Amino acid sequence: MSSHERAGTVATAADLVDVPALITAYYTVHPDPSDPVQQVAFGTSGHRGSALDAAFNDDHIAATSQAICDYRGGQGIGGPLFLGRDTHGLSEPAWATALEVFAANDVRVMIDSQDGYTPTPAVSHAILTYNRGRTTADPGRGDGVVVTPSHNPPRDGGFKYNPPDGGPAGADITGWIQDRANDYLRQELAGVKRIPLARARSADTTASYDYMGTYVADLPNVVDIAAIRSAGVRIGADPLGGASVAYWGAIAEAHGLDLTVVNPLVDPTWRFMTLDWDGKIRMDCSSPSAMASLIGKADQYDIATGNDADSDRHGIVTPDGGLMNPNHFLSVAIDYLYRNRVDWPGTAAVGKTVVSSSIIDRVAASLERQLIEVPVGFKWFVPGLIDGSIAFGGEESAGASFLRRDGSVWTTDKDGIIMALLASEILAVTGTSPSQHYRGLTDEFGAPVYARVDAPATREQKARLKDLSPEQVTATELAGEPITATLTRAPGNDAPIGGLKVCADNGWFAARPSGTEDVYKIYAESFLGDEHLARIQAEARDVVSAALTD
């Protein structure tokens, strides 16, 4: 993908969203329920869209909130609902809409005691803390909602549901909520209960919860904070204008860390951000363009970190390596944690997605740990993190979580804060940076090159790609090596991967249809260098094209 000419430069006035127009559209634009683009559509991370496109507005959130109430009633979930939000311009009004509906339905809602922003991991942590010791049949179980479109541009809003297991909701849940919400839209919100915000805030069912204090105080149980403090690691933490903005200062104060909040600003336009690769403002902490300002300050800190808007993703910057590729840090984290968490279950597996680097496979084998490879989506790691059968789950998109130091569950949603702190723990305990550790891994296992590119595809072709069978792939070699596996289901849990993965000894590719554009995404990796990677990418297009036209 070619980069925009202004990628990595600070945003100008012309790049900024008109926040008043955005908020006005949220309350005044009504969706057309017959238009798929304007319907409630839950992807892997909830419903997302912009009020300016009639894809995220008051009607959507009212309908979705009522649908969640209906779902809770049908499932016998009668405990508190933990409600959080990030710093996007649409998050505050959507949070208010949700509270109005939840309160009208007599749902006990836990809002932030400081009326602040709430990272996704803090909500997952709150759900699991409350539900500890409760069975799946307990009617007192709690669940949660985070109002966030994650790293999406400032014009977007997002709304995601976390069930009592604390993790992202599975397709069976989100599909039901989505369909129910769209029914309400078609009925012009008939059946949606709602009361004014002032009444909702003062309702007997609305209570406060100290998300930040509870989460921050518990951190030494998942990360070796004492080691970081004793080593005097100089940390620069950039919340990228997101929900962790107050958390990093609180972490520094509570635990006595040498930590500087690099950018403490919150602005719904994100005017302080550097533009991403495509010239848009996007809080992607794995992007060198979006992280350009922090990368430029790398020499000022031993470890510098970034988080996206809801803090479920991490970016790690070191003076010797710059911004680490997410796959590289995942492999380092796995190698370090499984060698240093002595109280973790000896049989706990390593979790990765099908599009994550194969160096993780080689690291897991060296640790003599089972590798569980699942489709894209953190939801697949939730059961394993809860029962301890998976100690670490990670995605190539810079999202991961892992068990507490005693081997029990921490969060079942991605936690970019503990991953950022882990980078400092690695330096503190070993004396070497995560990027130096990665170079050690490549010395042992080889140095992979990895890339993602897009290829054009019609809606019909994307549908066929999603439903391919291995038998439709007739190729026997990939870039000069025998094909060792042709997968349309994940080897770790036999769930459909929604596309195709083809593997050889020193390379692989995966092809998955885009949910928003007329393209399919090709993920590819080679342990034999850039030229071999290019061959894999070219042959991937040929293999997919042949399968789609067969």
Image (cartoon, rainbow, N blue to C red):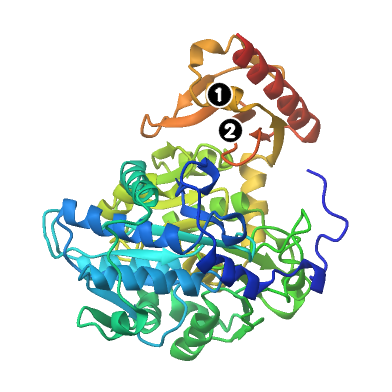
Which quadrant is home to the C terminus?
top right
| Identity, as a three-letter code, of the amino acid under mark 2 | Pro
Question: In the image, what residue occupies the spot 51% across and 36% down?
Answer: 354
Q: Tell which residue pokes out farthest to the right in this image.
A: 5
Count of labels in the image: 2
| Identity, as a three-letter code, of the amino acid under mark 1 | Leu
Image quadrant where residue 106 sits = bottom left
Image position of 190 with respect to 84: above or below: above
Q: Of helix, strand and loop, which one carries label 2?
A: strand
431 relative position to 107: left or right: right
Image quadrant where residue 52 sits = bottom right
Marks 1,2: beta carbons within 8 A: yes
Q: Position of residue 548 (x, y in %)?
A: 61, 16
* Nearer-N-terminus badge (1/2): 1
- Distance Cα–Cα, label 1 vs label 2: 7 Å
202 relative position to 86: left or right: left
Image position of 88 with respect to 176: above or below: below
Q: Of helix, strand and loop, which one carries label 1?
A: helix
Residue with the mark numbered 2: 513
Question: In the image, what residue occupies the spot 70% across and 35% down?
Answer: 454
Q: Position of residue 185 (x, y in %)?
A: 39, 51
Question: In the image, what residue occupies the spot 68% across and 52% down?
Answer: 439
Label 1, residues with CA under 10 Å away: few <14, some 14-19, many ≥20: many
Question: In the image, what residue occupies the spot 81% across and 69% down?
Answer: 14
Which quadrant is home to the N terminus?
top right
Residue with the mark numbered 1: 465
Q: Position of residue 61 (x, y in %)?
A: 42, 61
486 and 205: which one is in front? Answer: 205
Image position of 439 with respect to 207: above or below: above
Using the rendered image of the protein, determine whether residue 76 is visible from the camera's viewpoint.
yes
